[in-house]
C-alpha cells in the first residue's frame, strides 16, 4: 500500500490555495471554490483541500511536510510573509521541526528527520 493523498477541510479554499502555493505545492486540479489538489514538490503524494461549512472541533488536523533544507525553507517562507508558531528545533524523537498554522487553523509541521523518519533507534522489527 502507498499513501496517495491527504484531503483537508477549508472554509475558504481560495485563501488556503494561496497559502499552500506559497509553501511550494504545485496546483494540479483547480475546481475553485469547492476543491483543489496539489502535487508535493518531492515524492508522489498529493494534497487536496475541499470546501466545508464548518471545521472539525477539538484537535483538528496536523499535516507534516518534510524538507531536507528545513532552515532554508523556513527562512524563505518567513520572507514571503508566513508566520511560524515555533522556529526549527530538535525534538527528543530525533526530528527537527518548525510549527505553523494554515488560514483555517490546521496545524502544520515542517520537519526533517532523515533516516529517523521511519527508522529511529527504537523502531521495532
Image (spheres, rainbow, N blue to C red):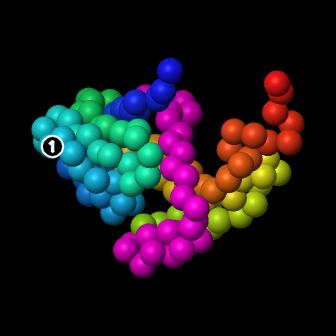
Q: Nearer the viewer, residue 87 or 122?
A: 122
Q: Residues within 10 Å of mark 1 (few under 14, many from 20)?
A: few
At 44% from the left and 46% from the top, the residue drawn is 43
Q: Is residue 16 left or right of residue 89?
A: left
At 71% from the left and 64% from the top, the residue drawn is 89
The percent position of residue 24, horizontal first and vertical second, equals 36, 60
Position above or below: 103 against 83: above
At 36% from the left and 40% from the top, the residue drawn is 47
The quadrant in which residue 31 appears is top left
Residue 42 visible: yes
Position above or below: 67 against 107: below
Secondary structure at numbered mark 1 = strand
At 22% from the left and 40% from the top, the residue drawn is 36
Position above or below: 103 against 86: above
Q: What residue would you read off at disc 1?
A: 30
**Quarter in which the C terminus is drawn:** top right
Query: Residue 13 lies in magenta, yes or no?
Result: no
The percent position of residue 44, horizontal first and vertical second, equals 40, 41
Query: Residue 65 lies in magenta, yes or no?
Result: yes
In the image, which residues are magenta?
56-81
Amino acid at each position: 500500500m502507498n499513501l496517495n493523498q491527504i484531503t483537508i477541510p477549508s472554509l475558504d479554499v481560495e485563501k488556503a490555495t494561496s497559502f499552500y502555493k506559497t509553501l511550494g505545492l504545485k496546483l494540479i486540479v483547480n475546481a475553485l471554490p469547492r476543491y483543489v489538489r496539489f502535487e508535493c514538490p518531492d515524492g508522489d503524494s498529493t494534497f487536496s483541500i475541499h470546501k466545508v461549512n464548518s471545521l472539525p472541533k477539538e484537535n483538528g488536523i496536523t499535516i507534516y511536510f518534510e524538507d531536507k533544507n528545513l532552515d532554508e525553507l523556513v527562512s524563505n517562507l518567513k520572507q514571503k510573509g508566513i508566520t511560524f508558531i515555533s522556529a526549527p528545533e530538535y525534538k527528543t524523537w530525533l526530528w527537527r521541526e518548525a510549527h505553523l498554522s494554515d488560514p483555517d487553523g490546521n496545524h502544520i509541521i515542517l520537519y526533517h528527520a532523515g533516516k529517523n523518519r521511519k527508522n529511529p533507534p527504537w523502531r521495532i522489527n
